[in-house]
Every structure is written in C-alpha cells, then in structure tokens.
Image: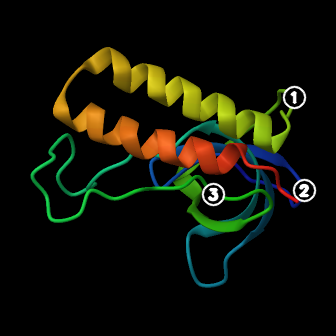
Amino acid sequence: MHEFQSGQLVQFRYKTGRYIGEFMEVSANSPRAVIKVLAVLEHPDQGDLHHPYRTDVPIFHERRASAKHERVLVPLRDIEPYTGDVPEYRTSLLDAVRRKKEELAARRDDWSARGLELLERLEAEYERPLY
C-alpha cells in the first residue's frame, strides 16, 4: 500500500464516482483517509446501487457528484497517486456528466433512460451560475 503525504494529489473512487483530490490525513481509528475534492473524473452512477441496472425499484436514486473542496472519507485501498494537471472543478464536473450521458445514451435500455433523465436534471443545476 502506498504512503500518502498531506497535500499530495490523489485520484480515488467515492460512491461510484472518480475524483482528483488533495490528501489531507489518515482518519483516526480507521483504514480511511480524508481527501479534499478538487475535480471530477467520472460522475457517480444513478439508480439503486443494491439493484444495479434495474428500474423496478422503490427509489431510483439521484446521485450528485461530490462538491468542490468537500472533504470525503475514502478507504485507503481506493486511493492512488495522481500526477497530471488538475482541471478546474466545474469544467471537470460538466465534462464528466457529458461523458456519462453519452455512455448511457449508447446503451438504449430502461435503466439508462432513467439515469439519463436524472443526469440531464443535474446537468441543468450544475450549469447554473454560482452567484
């Protein structure tokens, strides 16, 4: 397992998304680390994670990407060093949504159609001015 230093750039998986972040610290009493989100590499999946690719579920969950500078608790096994440039958060978020929408549109099934609806709603929110 890799030893990370405070301030080091990392990439990591968190709740079905992938992100670039800044390693903050190892959590006390747990094999997890606190990471500050800097950019989105892959937008989280939509729907019920316990019944993937099914639409006949009680709640088809909308999953937002983690926010800029949000601190998240990530298992150490899901963290890797990152050496590339860090894109601007909002640009990376919108790019990740567009890539996920293209992926879902290519599948052409009920689950993808429901996920696409949620992503389009999220994209509209993400595109709104921040001020």
Q: Which residue is mark 1?
A: 85
Q: Secondary structure at mark 2?
A: loop
Callout in the foreground (1, 3)? 3
Q: Residue at x 78, y 34 (%)?
A: 91
Q: Residue at x 46, y 56 (%)?
A: 63
Residue 67: x, y in percent?
70, 59
Q: Secondary structure at mark 1?
A: loop
> How far, Cα to Cα, is label 1 from label 3?
19 Å
Answer above or below: position of 55 versus 99: below
Q: Quadrant of the C terminus?
A: bottom right
Q: Give the label on residue 66, or none.
A: 3
**Circle 1 residues within 10 Å: few <14, some 14–19, many ≥20:** few
Callout in the foreground (3, 2)? 3
Instruction: Classify residue 24 as left or right of residue 103.
Output: right
| One can see residue 1 in this view | no
Q: Which residue is mark 2?
A: 7
